[in-house]
Amino acid sequence: MDETKIEYGTDVFNESVMRAYLAKDTAEALLHTMRDHAPLNPAIANEVAHALKQWAMARGATHFTHWFQPLTGSTAEKHDAFFEPIGVGQTLARFSGKNLIMGEPDASSFPSGGLRRTFEARGYTAWDVTSPAFIKRHANGATLCIPTVFCSYTGEVLDKKTPLLRSMQALEKAVRRLMAAFGAPAEGHVVCTLGPEQEYFLIDRSFWLKRPDLIQCGRTLFGAPPARHQQLEDHYFGSIKPRVIAFMEDVERELWRLGIPAKTRHNEVAPAQFELAPMFEELNLAVDHNMLVMETLRNVAERHGFVCLLHEKPFAGVNGSGKHNNWSVAYDGKNLLDPGKNPQENAIFLAMLASVIRAIDLHADILRAATAGAGNDHRLGANEAPPSIISIFLGEELSGVIDRIEKGARATGGQDATLRVGVDTLPPLPRDTTDRNRTSPFAFTGNKFEFRAPGSSQNCAGVCMVLNTIVAESVDTVAAAIEKLPKERFNDGLQKILQAVITDHKRVIFNGDGYSEAWVAEAARRGLPNLHATPEALAPMLAQKNLDLFAKAGVLSPTEMESRHAVFMEEYARKVTIEGKAALEMARSMIEPAATAEFGAVCKAIESAQGIGVRAGVSVREVAETLGMGLDALHEACKALEAALGAGEPARILEALATLRKSVDKLEEDVDDARWPLPKYRDMLFVY
Ligand code: ADP
Ligand code: MG
């Protein structure tokens, strides 16, 4: 490939643009602010705003927007033109420091969980300097986007970014403390890193247009399994079809222009399912970038006559889509989850590892809560996605190491069996990908953790905010213990600390098959939570221990936690209700008429056969009767769903929906193909 033809980061207000458009001192000050998460000096805001405007307009932008991430789970933007009239028929392009730093969207229509009643609608967005401004392109123009956080005037947060940034601070502080306990300089630079692998489906737009369920809910509410789905296992890593690769190339070009390091593309397990993985980046940026990845996938798909489905379970019976969050922390450029090469590096790695194990064991409930949602419920716990039981996979070698540390401190067993922290060197840990356990929700993969439970449509901010917070608490606790160790007994003492953590929390480590029934029973025996549906999975958000944890970390106040819980519960109920209503409408206005017509045609055939004296045998009658019974079942199921919708109970709606689906899917097999009003799985998943 001709490197000069790749436009990388050309639509980002990056370091080189800053240096080109800003005075040296201003550029330095801004870069310092970005890198060190320092507060922006208001004195430079006007100059920065002017530079941004000049740059953006030179690149075709006519508007600017504060770009933020409300609790809806998507991004929000309200565009304003740069132009301001100065007299009749004359205008001037204006963009001030004030415009840059703060915006006041009418916040009343965003979910707040009761934090902000409509009559006190005011909220404001504030520039998040750590994420660079960028330009979004549309068919006829472009908009300068300023990544921002979103708060209410009373100070409560209304978005997903603010708590994420706070959680990063909590983790930074804890990691610094840990590193200081190991004798590192206290002011080292801590960076949380994230590489989110994005799974998605592509279907032809013409099918989508005929599926009200996909249009309204993002998933098929009906659809019989086709003869061939994913059992041949021929899609995963298969050669990518020309139409799809053309789409992928367009997506990548757009992402690269935005400075998003899209790196890997491949076919996923289910037919019509694909994955895009970027190189990891600083967590905050990676979160923003993933939001843009999802948007870009959707937009480019449309241009290619596809629709990109980001729902966690668009099709029953084939794999759903997740978003694997590859997460780690680095200190002064060194990845702390990399085992390292000498006993000192190993010791730091083991302290981090032990902290993560402790965090996941103590706070599995709140981590599970972060992945909850109407879409992901169809995926977690089904035999294809990591189960709703949160456990850690370490792999054989690292589990062996953990065992030996435990033994070492107890000083039982032979010398060979023990590992002395800070003295012995860790054996090399394999990093190959072939025999990795794919059934674990939280897996150590050589130099990072891969959290696989999050759903494909979810904003990474929520899960990473929780992960940072629980690990921060744990790192802080471990660091506090290490700090107290006398120099001369440091290694022995460290070993004892790690041993205690391992002994107390190793129940959360599980290297076996996470999809097996045996694990469900075993996890229950170990006392690990297994929270299935969203309402029960979200409940831990209100547990006192979690309210205290988030308040102490300075990430979310109890009021903010409670309001978030309310928002997510309501969103869940709304989504389930929409699905119920959509299904009922489709069943009554599309399925029932088709099945009735079929039934009528068969009955008519029997009648006219008899009229001309042709024998209408048992088989035709059976067909008619099957259809008749199918229609009865459909009718009953519709009534039950209607009642459930009336009662407004999500669990009942989902149950009634499942029953209705059974009767519709049965009719799909019995009704004339030409009469069936919905595109079928065999077409949607294979014809593209
Ligand atoms: P695979 O897991 O498929 O073998 P990789 O190990 O290369 O692939 O990485 C998968 C994802 O994890 C990529 O997005 C990659 O950038 C990311 N990743 C790698 N190292 C880190 C890290 N230190 N922190 C966060 N993410 C990482
Ligand atoms: Mg994958």
Image (cartoon, rainbow, N blue to C red):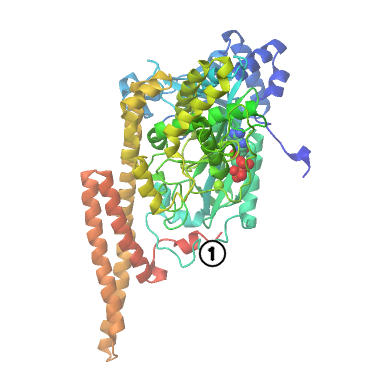
Q: Can residue 140 be seen in this view?
A: no
Q: Nearer the viewer, residue 609 or 351?
A: 351
Relative to 477, residue 631 above or below: below
Figure check: 100 above or below 582? above
Which amino acid lies under the numbered mark 1 shown in the image of this protein? Leu
Residue 517: % across, % down: 38, 53
> Which residue position holds label 1?
232
Name above or below for residue 215 compared with residue 612. above
Relative image position of residue 264 (x, y in whole percent): 63, 45
**Which residue is more in the foreground, 608 or 511?**
511
Write the residue at 56% across / 50% down: 274
Q: In this view, does 431 lie to the left or right of 233?
A: right
Residue 563: % across, % down: 33, 26
The image quadrant where one finds the N terminus is top right
Percent coordinates x, y for residue 571 in the rendering: 35, 37
485 displayed left or right of 363? right
**Placement of 24 over or under 272, stated as above or below:** above
In what quadrant of the picture does the C terminus appear?
bottom right
